[in-house]
Image: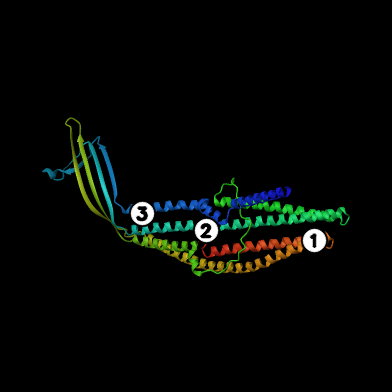
Amino acid sequence: MRLFYSKRVVQWQFLFLLVSYQAQAQDESTLDELIKKALIQNLAVLSEQTGVQTTQAQIDQVKARALPQVNFAGDYRYYIKVPAQVLPLSAFGGPEGSYTAAAFSLPFNLSSTLQVNQQLFNPALRIGLRLAKAAQGITDLQIVRSKEEVTYNVSAAYYNAQTAAQQILFLRDNMARLEESIRVLTLQYENKLVQGIDVDRLRLNRTSLETQIESLQSDYNRILNLLKFLTGIPQTEPLRVRTQIDSTQRGGDYDASLVINRSDLLLLQRQQEINELNIRNTKAGFLPTLSAYGVANNTVFAITKGNDYSTAIPGYWIGLQLNWSVFDGNLRKAQIAQYRSEGQRINLQQKQLNESIAMDIATATNQIAVQQRNLQTTQSQVGLAKKVYTQTQLQLKEGVADLTQLIQAENALRESQNNYLTALVRLRTAELDLNKATGNLLKNY
């Protein structure tokens, strides 16, 4: 009966541990989950996305200039003294060289004018619409660039968090081994087999491990706070990352055609397009513009002193208006020279960026190959160091090995673990750099 009871207790304990582990695993956030949150909630991305509305408003403004423009004007006047005009008396049969002043209006004047204008020929309007749409393309590319930066920063912070968490696990595992060695040496000291200073040396190592764990825990919490900031998660909410770092060996090959995905390269191309449109827009200023217009006018004249009288006189007319800036003091010529100089600067930036892309790809590819070899080497070193440390512990219990050998084995194990984590995180970072260099950080999002 007792045996059955203990088996049942063990089963329940195992089930509890299994459920606890599964719940903990569900609480852990993956890198993909955090990147997707960041692309939606990051403040920098949201700030760039507000520019879409601004550029759309600019496009609407250019389109509005091509539509008919309707204006209404009203004017009310009361003449305290009606202004007069000077007329020659000879026009009315009077003597030559004599003049008189006569008022031809009434004191009360009320006029209203409705005017409709429609541009018939204005090359700057069509080019301005293309400029506004090109500006919208730049806004879209800036959003992509912001998302790429966020993806890179979240990935780098996530790898650093995983490294800190894994180092803490390694140190806690080493702490457990160290506690066992302290227990063994304490028993040997009580049996007068070793000196008390040997136990103190191991306790000093334990204190050093505790300090390292506390420091790493502080770094881990700081990185988690950074991840919350990058992903738009409130600082008060809990966050956990997966401790186990993916050690899969990935290839370092890439397709050179993928370089066209670089948002900064596409951004320069779009800037060059806008620069060329600015030159065309400035040249369009040399051409005349033609507009059609129509006017409907109605004026009311009235008098109220004594003999009241009022009359309304309508007027309607249509016309064409030609505007041509014949000479502007060589202003447009200077503007075109400025835009051409800007185009040369953009061309040089494109060449420099292409060289930088080639260098980044070569560096990242080489780093991947190096860290893949380092990872294989350090993995075997960790296994060998664990084996040596375990054997040295057994030999210490049997009195064959001394404390110095145990401490050396522990240091070797800790160094191999650090080398392994360093190689692993450098490999992941190099892969991240390769995706950044080829413009494929967002290919899965």
Q: Are marks 3 and 1 in contact (CB under 8 Å)?
A: no
Q: Is residue 301 left or right of residue 213?
A: left
Identify the secondary structure beneath mark 1: helix
Q: Is residue 422 or residue 395 the one in the foreground?
A: 395
Q: Is residue 433 left or right of residue 324?
A: right
Distance between mark 1 and mark 2 Cα atoms: 52 Å
**Label 2 neighbour load within 10 Å: few <14, some 14-19, many 20+:** many
Read off the residue under disc 3.
62
Q: Secondary structure at mark 2?
A: helix
Q: Position of residue 376 (x, y in %)?
A: 66, 67
Of the numbered discs 2 and 3, the one sitting upstream in the chain is 3
| Mark 1 or 2, nearer chain start | 2
**Separation (CA) of disc 2 from disc 3:** 31 Å
Contact between labelled residues 3 and 2, with CB atoms less than 8 Å apart: no
Give yes or no for contact between labels 1 and 2 (Cβ–Cβ under 8 Å).
no
Q: Residues within 10 Å of mark 3 (few under 14, many from 20)?
A: some
Q: Nearer the viewer, mark 1 or mark 2?
A: 1
Position of 418 relative to 221 (above/below):
below
Mark 1 neighbour density, 10 Å: few (under 14) some (14–19) many (20 or more): some
Q: Which mark is residue 394?
A: 1
